[in-house]
Image: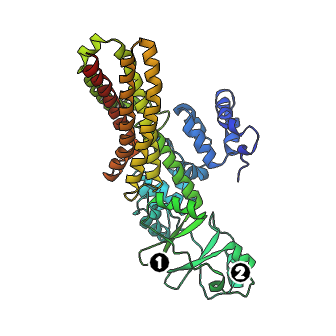
Amino acid sequence: MPSSILNQENKENILVQAIELLETGSQVQVRDFIHALYPAETANILESLDIEQRVRVWKVIPPNVMGEILVRVHTEVGQGLLKITDRRDLIKATENLESDDMVDLLHVLPEPLLSEVMESMGVHERNRLESALTYDDHTAGGLMSLDVLTIRPDVTLEVVMRYLHQRGEMPESTDSLIVVDRSDHLLGVLSLADLLSNAPSTKVEDAMDDKIKGVSYLMPAHDVAMMFEQRQMLSAPVIAENGRLMGRVTIDDVVGIIREEADHSIMSMAGLDEEQDMFAPVMTSAKRRAVWLGVNLVTAFLASWVIGLFEATLEEIVALAVLMPIVASMGGIAGSQTLTLVVRGLALRQVSHSNATQLLFKELSVGIVNGVFWAVIVAIIASIWFQSMDLGMLLGAAMVINLVCAALAGASIPMALDKMGIDPALAGGVLLTTVTDCIGFLAFLGLATIFLL
């Protein structure tokens, strides 16, 4: 196992060191630096380099480490690395992988390379992995490792210890042994702590925890991560519908889910895919972002159309054009606060039909309170600025209307999108901005048309 540079005081400078070596160091220095890192650290560096530097680093990585790195980089980066990797090296890269990492790697291998890798395995291992490949990536079945240690309930702990000594090694992240009957149905788990702390003559059935029910292989990955967090688990057995043991999910898999969901939440708000390469070619990136910019342009034209309805009013009272952005901006910020709160609640399963009405009324109340408070402030400022009390009052009234509508939209839009199976983080922001802009302009300019002309 390498001695991680992250243990040093300058751990935050790993990327800086890597880039400096690539620019001024020799290939031997680059190799020595990369070999001192853990695979996950190397994966992070590869994602942070441009394509030319990435190729140079990849050339110094030994084949037996390549597989661990490929399953940790984003999909698009991994696809690029696969194109520059020798087939024989890729086959070697699969030899020492844990079964769950192997499944992840096989998912991204193109044909005919996938078939070639599968043929290089033994029959038993190939059959196990082929069945694992049929499970959805975003379920417990897709996350699970097939490498598990099982024991029978009627043996003593002394027998279990002898078995472990003869075996010589355990799968990574093993914190417990899984107890099954002769048909491989889950009965419970025996933690390593209980194994070591109980008398050797104690039977497994007396020392095991039989409250563990296991995780269905169909359970969504998000729910698995929540269960691990709420119950402070390090691993969990995965079972079929009939209770038969299939594998296990470990904490390292859950950490990966959490990171992926965090990446997705951040990137989707800008219409981007978390699996995209940060250093993808300019034209590729431009084409992807053009779609989202086009959607935004449509919404911008809609807001402009609303403004155009009051062209005569704006010509008569120029001050309205100066104050319009205030109404839209305040509504947008207030709505975004509510939207973020609700999207987070939906992701954590804290918002459902049972409490949605309460949350909606609460956010409306917040919108009213903030609307009135800030309406008074902007009304005073606008009255002094333009020497018009009427204009200030209209601005304040429009702000109350927009903040209340922003709260309503910020709460209802993500709930509606979630019910329709659309990711609220992806589409919610654009819809909210459209609503707050249009209602803000409509309220302010409409009131001005009615009362000032």
Expressed as whole percent of the image width and height from the top left, the position of residue 60 reads 62, 41
- The x, y position of residue 209, in whole percent, is 61, 78
| Viewer-closest of 394 and 232 | 394
Against 327, residue 160 (above or below) is below
Q: In this view, does 156 lie to the left or right of 93?
A: right
Q: In this view, does 321 lie above or below 422?
A: above
Q: Is mark 2 on a helix, strand or loop?
A: helix
> Residue 162 — which label?
2
Q: What residue did someone put label 1 on?
A: 244
In the rendered image, the vertical position of residue 364 relative to residue 244, given as above or below: above
Residue 300's image quarter? Answer: top left
Which mark is nearer the camera, 2 or 1?
A: 1
Q: Name which residue type carries label 1.
A: Arg
Q: Residue furthest front?
A: 389
| Residue at 42% in and 78% down | 242
Q: Nearer the viewer, residue 98 or 336?
A: 336
Residue type of the residue flagged with mark 2: Arg
- Report if residue 403 is visible in the image: yes
Name the one closer to the observer, 324 or 341.
324
